[in-house]
Image (cartoon, helix red, strand yellow):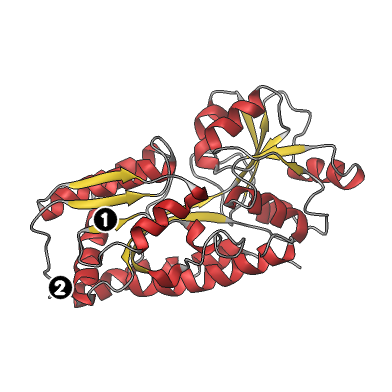
Amino acid sequence: MTTKPLNTLLGATALAFGALVATQAAAECDWKPDRAVTYVVPWGAGGGTDANSRMIASLLSQEFGQPFNVVNRTGGNGVTGHSALARAKPDGYTVGAATVEINTMHWVGLTDLTYKNISPIALVDVVPAGFTVKAGSPFNSVQEVLDVAKAEPGKLTASGTSQGGIWHLALAGLLNAEGIDPEAIRWIPSKGAAPAMKELMADGVDVVTVAQSEAKTLIEQGELKGLGYMHTERMAALPDIPTTAEQLDSGWTLAAFITVSGPEGMDPEVVCSYEKAALKVMASPEWAEFKASRGSDVVLMGTSDLSAMLEKSDAALGETIKAIGLAK
């Protein structure tokens, strides 16, 4: 069965202008923190979520005139940090980065938390997966890899995150969509993109399916080779790498995402004030320059559209997780 979670996820992104108009209509939202705010990041320092979160926290600090203190709450494949965010007092003094794992963890039995346990504020980033090999790999296309996987199941290995993590879903879902056993390429769990790419360069695995933006520098340096971008449009910073939508009959695409969200039950006035501030700073030259430095596009999506996107993404990812036999 073919599913396209990225298309579903991005379906509302084109409504960015509408989100801004809606925010303007809510100009009366004028709540402001009068002391420091804790900004929870469920993942470790140095990664993409951390970088985006620290930048948005810095800009929000400037906008509100109060410190936004980033706290990395790692562990449990995202459960620890998301739990800390979702279960904090909903008074506006704890917000943070709810990531795509809010829509995967419950499907694989790690937690009962879902997107319903947070207060979505704004979309920060959309992060399509890549399909990357070592520079000296004999493979020059995604299809060449799939041909070997189909002919010799279990011969090839891949990595990028933990078992059942979003980059594992990117590969297993792609295989499933192409009518290949999701286990035909053996998944080697890792603690994240950086160690997975090190393992790739050391010939420990054949493929990584981490975010293409995370592999961008090593691809540009000639250490790695990008075979596919799991998106509907090529990455502007790496325009020679074709999309999976171009290459594959299934048109498979998949992306992670990062949001700024609060705990469940936040006052709508507080959510509205945060939404207005977040969309304002993400429309700034400083944010655009930051995103360009990472080879990423600026995305603008406010509370209403983000809430709808989370609901659709949860259903689509659940369908994929069930299809590849990881649901619990």
Q: Amino acid at mark 2?
A: Cys
Which residue is denoted by mark 1 in the rendering?
Answer: 283
Q: Nearer the viewer, residue 110 or 130?
A: 110
Q: Residue at x 29, y 74 (%)?
A: 265
On residue 122, which mark appears?
A: none
Q: Amino acid at mark 1?
A: Ala
> Mark 2 or mark 1, which is nearer the start of the sequence?
2
Q: Is residue 273 visible?
A: yes
Q: SS for tag 2?
A: loop
Which residue is denoted by mark 2 in the rendering?
Answer: 29
Residue 142 as seen in the image, left or right of residue 15: right
Residue 61 as seen in the image, left or right of residue 124: left
Q: Quadrant of residue 250?
A: bottom right
| Residue 274, horizontal then vertical, whole percent | 22, 64
Q: Residue at x 27, y 44 (%)?
A: 70
Q: SS for tag 1?
A: loop
Q: Callout 1 environment at 10 Å: few (<14), some (14 to 19), or many (20+)?
A: some
Q: Nearer the viewer, residue 257 or 191?
A: 191
